[in-house]
Image (spheres, rainbow, N blue to C red):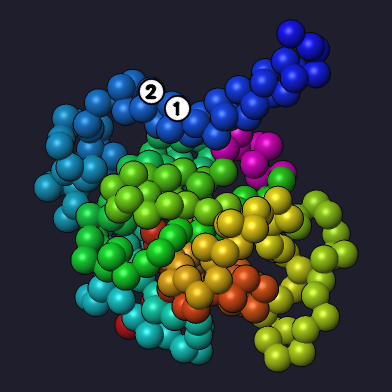
Amino acid sequence: MKLLPLLDRIKGFFLRLLKKLPDLISGALDFVYPPVCLVCGLYCEKDICPDCIKLVTRPDKKSFNIRELYAYGDFRYYAGYSGVVKEIIGRFKFKGEMWIGRRLGNILYESFVDCFDYYDLIVYVPAGRASFLKRGFDQCSEIAAGLSKRSGLPVLRALESNSGKGRQHRLKRDSRKDNVTGRFRISDVLTKEELGKLRGSRTLLIDDILTTGSTLRECACLLIDECGCLKVDAMVFATGRTDIG
Ligand SMILES: [Zn+2]
């Protein structure tokens, strides 16, 4: 066998393996972490046990139309960013407990189970380079993977963070330029097929926490303007804002 085709086959094997890696890790994590309550750690079939769920501040409504904050679609969040929710997210993002991400995705699925038929795909807000290197994983990718596993919706890594690359990607747009600051860009390794999936799609955009809303606005704006997404609804795990309702 000639060397070059052989090298291509080896490279192909590793690329396929790399694509399957998140699923393999996810399966391994399911095995390593038995069903326990995310808060108290006691055995429980649910992500948060009946006692601990009383400590979670849930919104009154399931979805919100908050045009002044997010004008590109509907907005949903699981809980207020305080108390036990803040603790869980802190362990996930800052103490290396990567496995929590899949469970957060699972919680989102269980909380909004009726809405997922509407969507074509999931896109998540990517971590910046520095936080990815520090954390060792992309937190919203983990949440999206957990959500995908339950909903069956495909996840597309359509966005990339420009952090650490300066502002050279700033776009010269006119209409919605206020929302596009150059912190993100559409991934330049998307295939034609993937771009085709985005065009006209009803996309669900995932982030972990909503603060000012600028991240969601920028990502949604890029997805609509650059990829032709039809609608981008946002879903985040928690928000500290008290003015949504
Ligand atoms: Zn508990």
Q: Does the stretch in magenta take in 135? A: yes
The picture quadrant where one finds residue 235 is bottom left
Give the image location of residue 118, x and y in percent.
32, 70
Give the image location of residue 135, x and y in percent.
60, 37
Q: Residue at x 68, y 86 (%)?
A: 176
Q: Residue at x 47, y 71 (%)?
A: 201
Q: Is residue 88 above or below residue 238?
A: above
User: Magenta segment, which residues?
Assistant: 130-137
Q: Is residue 51 visible?
A: yes
Q: Residue furthest top?
A: 1
Quadrant location of the N terminus?
top right
Left or right, residue 74 beside residue 61:
right
Q: Residue at x 19, y 52 (%)?
A: 53
Q: Is residue 170 above or below residue 66?
A: above
Q: For this rendering, which residue is in front, 148 or 212? A: 148
| Label 1: how many Cα within 10 Å (few below 14, some 14–19, many 20+) | few
Q: CA distance from mark 1 to mark 2?
A: 5 Å
Q: Is residue 27 above or below residue 92?
A: above
Secondary structure beneath label 2: helix
Q: Dot 2 corresponds to which residue? A: 28
| Label 2: how many Cα within 10 Å (few below 14, some 14–19, many 20+) | few
Q: For this rendering, which residue is in front, 139 or 175? A: 175
Q: Dot 1 corresponds to which residue? A: 25
Q: Is residue 132 above or below residue 16?
A: below
The picture quadrant where one finds residue 47 is top left
Quadrant location of the C terminus?
bottom left
Q: For this rendering, which residue is in front, 58 or 106? A: 106
Amino acid at circle 2: Ala
Pointer 1 with pointer 2, Cβ within 8 A: yes
Give the image location of residue 50, x and y in percent.
12, 47
Q: Is residue 97 visible?
A: no
